[in-house]
Image (spheres, rainbow, N blue to C red):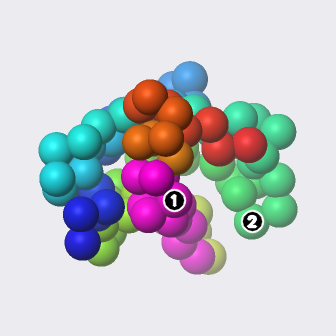
Amino acid sequence: MYWEIQKAIFKDDFSIDVQFVDGMSGVVHVKPSRLIRVFKPLKDVKIFTKGFIKYGAVTWDVGEYELDLAPDTMYHEIKKNQGVYIFK
């Protein structure tokens, strides 16, 4: 699908530079206030920056389970908001 992620750079400011298979790119800003419940392990910057791409989605292995963010939502928000998606 056009919204699959082909490249991701995870930064220690809790942002992710992403590039999709169709060439569109942008930045995802993950707000610390969103890192609760299932996302709580991502408050550890060492875990956050070890994200990877799995099946076209940004993914994290947090030990007991894997977390991912929906790439289709990222794609549409980045397109709609001039290259930026704020995950809050």
Q: Does 62 sit left or right of 22 as displayed?
A: right
Query: Which residues fall within the magenta stretch?
Result: 65-76
Q: Is residue 21 magenta?
A: no
The answer to which of 24 and 49 lies nearer the viewer is 24
Dot 2 falls on a residue whose secondary structure is helix
Residue 2, horizontal then vertical, whole percent: 24, 63
- Residue marked by disc 1: 73
What residue is rendered at 24% in x and 72% in y?
1
User: Which residue is pictured at 52% across the width and 46% down the height?
Assistant: 77
Q: Residues within 10 Å of mark 1 (few under 14, many from 20)?
A: few
- Residue type at tag 1: Thr
Q: Is residue 22 left or right of residue 20?
A: left
Vertical relation: 85 (above or below) 13: below
CA gap, disc 2 and disc 1:
18 Å
Q: Residue at x 44, y 64 (%)?
A: 72
Is residue 16 among what the camera can see?
no
Crowdedness near tag 2: few (<14), some (14–19) or many (≥20) residues, C-alpha within 10 Å: few
Q: Which residue is mark 2?
A: 38
Foreground mark, 2 or 1, reads 1
Q: Residue furthest front?
A: 80
Q: Residue furthest top?
A: 13
Precedes in sequence: disc 2 or disc 1? 2
Q: Please state the horizontal and vertical placement of residue 20, each as a whole percent of the image.
A: 25, 51
Q: Nearer the viewer, residue 76 or 61?
A: 76
67 relative position to 49: left or right: right
Give the residue drawn at x 62%, y 37%. 86
Residue 74 painted magenta: yes
The local secondary structure at tag 1 comes to helix
Percent from the top left, x then y, of residue 41?
69, 54
Quarter of the figure with the C terminus: top right
